[in-house]
Amino acid sequence: MRRSLIYLLLLVTLPAVAQIYKYTDANGNPAYSNQPPNGTPSETVDLPPLNSVNTKKPNVQNAAPTTPPQQNQATAAYSVLALTDLPTDEALRANNGTFTVGVAIQPHLQSGHLLQLVIDGKSYGQISNVPRLQVVNLERGEHSLAVRVVSGTQVIQQSETLTATVQRVHVGKP
């Protein structure tokens, strides 16, 4: 096991053109090195070719996600994409303007896709792969909320926009 681990570490850390030498150390254990040991018999180790993966560089621009094109249900990536846990018949009571909203999404979020909350038409907070999004210190009053599925700077899909009224307690000085 130890020999395999040492072999693996040497394989990963050394350049592909380096030669590996195997020898027995003073305690009788096999050892590996990229240089032949002085005064100790050694043998060269033939390494298998390294694996490689071709990657495609993303086309990243320093811009907000693009506006989603008009989508019909036939081309939508998700059959269900909606905000949940927002009251529809009454004001949302959030004394400090902090609350969370849920995201209903079907099928599950695909690899490389993330969720972005949209408040009053602007991207809000951090993008996330968790279907619970937090709003912090939102001013009282009426706000429009939606959720986007994004991949990099591209908007994959956006939910229907909901309107919610945030009610905050005003604490005045006595």
Image: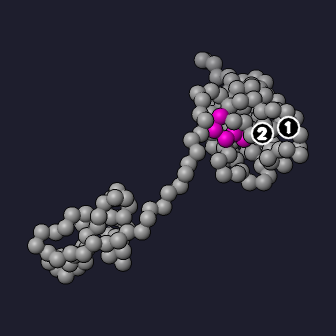
**In the picture, which quadrant includes the C terminus?**
top right
Q: Is residue 167 above or below residue 1?
A: above
Coordinates of residue 158 in the picture (x, y in percent): 78, 37
Coordinates of residue 11 in the picture (x, y in percent): 36, 64
Quadrant for residue 58, please give it.
top right
Range covered by the magenta-colored residues:
149-153
Regarding mark 2 in the picture, which secondary structure is present there?
A: strand
Residue matched to label 2: 157
Residue 51 in sight in this render: yes
- Of residues 165 and 106, the one nearer the viewer is 106
Residue displayed at 60% across by 17% down: 173
On whether residue 151 falls in the magenta region, the answer is yes
- Of residues 110 and 95, the one nearer the viewer is 110
Residue 167 in sight in this render: no
Q: Is residue 93 left or right of residue 50?
A: right
| Amino acid found under the numbered disc labelled 2 | Gln
Residue displayed at 62% across by 27% down: 63
The prevailing secondary structure element of the residues shown in magenta is strand
Coordinates of residue 155 in the picture (x, y in percent): 72, 36
Residue displayed at 89% across by 44% down: 73
- Of residues 17 and 123, the one nearer the viewer is 17
Q: Is residue 34 above or below residue 122?
A: below
Q: For the residues labelled 1 and 2, say whether their Cβ atoms are less than 8 Å apart.
A: yes
Residue displayed at 53% across by 55% down: 53
Residue at the left extreme, as displayed: 39
Regarding mark 1 in the picture, which secondary structure is present there?
A: loop
Residue matched to label 1: 71
| Amino acid found under the numbered disc labelled 1 | Gln
Quadrant for residue 156, please give it.
top right
